[in-house]
Image (cartoon, rainbow, N blue to C red):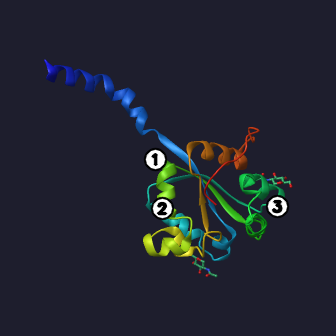
Amino acid sequence: MSLLLLAFTFLLCRSPCDASVEKERTLAMIKPDGVFGNYTDKIKEVILESGFSIITEMVVQLDEGNATVFYVEHSHRDFFPGLVKYMTSGPVYIMVLEKVNAISDWRALIGPTDARKARISHPSSIRAMCGLDSEMNCVHGSDSPQSAAREISFFFGEMPGGIVRHEEL
Ligand SMILES: *[C@@H]1O[C@H](CO)[C@@H](O)[C@H](O)[C@H]1NC(C)=O
Ligand SMILES: *[C@@H]1O[C@H](CO)[C@@H](O)[C@H](O)[C@H]1NC(C)=O
């Protein structure tokens, strides 16, 4: 009886349960230090080797207004002027990445925010490879499904009037 139930559940589950392994999209950015340091090709190689598809990509030069909007929740912080200066110091390379679990897998691949810590605890992470410290950390990744949606629309669609929020620099 219970075996039958199990088999039945399995059959019922098959298609709805596939929904839980749906592909997810996230925003990846190679920051000016990564682009200047000629890490773009190397990072894209790591991305593809790790099973992500690059859905779309572009080079953007952010201005002060763009950087301020992107990081607006940090605008009251001491490091904000330096952050805006850094993010506008050269082009950034923007990608939309797709795979199952893309948001947390990309975060895992880039490693801890502070590249100095990344070099110790996650030596094979992208930030360990090309980051300098907690601000000049070479790459960005959306930190939640909400951030991913907002950040992708920031670069590729309408800003839905919301604030782009992220704990992550
Ligand atoms: C930049 O990186 C590419 C491939 O990663 C390499 O072929 C090229 O020689 C590098 N250029 C410089 C200026 O280091
Ligand atoms: C950045 O701001 C400029 C106007 O200063 C605008 O033309 C451009 O579309 C903005 N870029 C992004 C990615 O929001």
Q: Quadrant of residue 64?
A: bottom right
Q: Which residue is mark 3?
A: 63
Q: Earlier in the sequence, mark 2 or mark 1?
A: 1
Quadrant placement of the N terminus: top left
**Residue nearest the viewer, comparing 74 with 94:** 74
**Residue nearest the viewer, comparing 15 with 108:** 108
Is label 1 in a helix, a strand or a loop? loop
Q: Which residue is mark 1?
A: 101
Asked whether, in this view, residue 68 is left or right of residue 101, the answer is right
Mark 3 is surrounded, within 10 Å at the Cα level, by few (under 14), some (14 to 19) or many (20 or more) other residues, namely: some
Give how far across and how far down residue 54 sits, in percent.
Answer: 56, 54
Task: Give the label on residue 130, or none.
Answer: none
Quick check: can you spot residue 33? yes
Question: Does the numbered disc 3 mark a residue whose Cβ is under 8 Å from ligand 2?
Answer: yes
Residue at left 60%, top 46%? 148
Mark 2 is surrounded, within 10 Å at the Cα level, by few (under 14), some (14 to 19) or many (20 or more) other residues, namely: some
- Amino acid identity at mark 2: Leu
Is label 2 in a helix, a strand or a loop? helix
Q: CA distance from mark 1 to mark 3?
A: 31 Å
Q: CA distance from mark 3 to mark 2?
A: 28 Å
Q: CA distance from mark 2 to mark 1?
A: 12 Å
Quick check: can you spot residue 123? no
Residue at left 50%, top 72%? 117
Quadrant placement of the C terminus: bottom right
Q: Which residue is mark 2?
A: 109
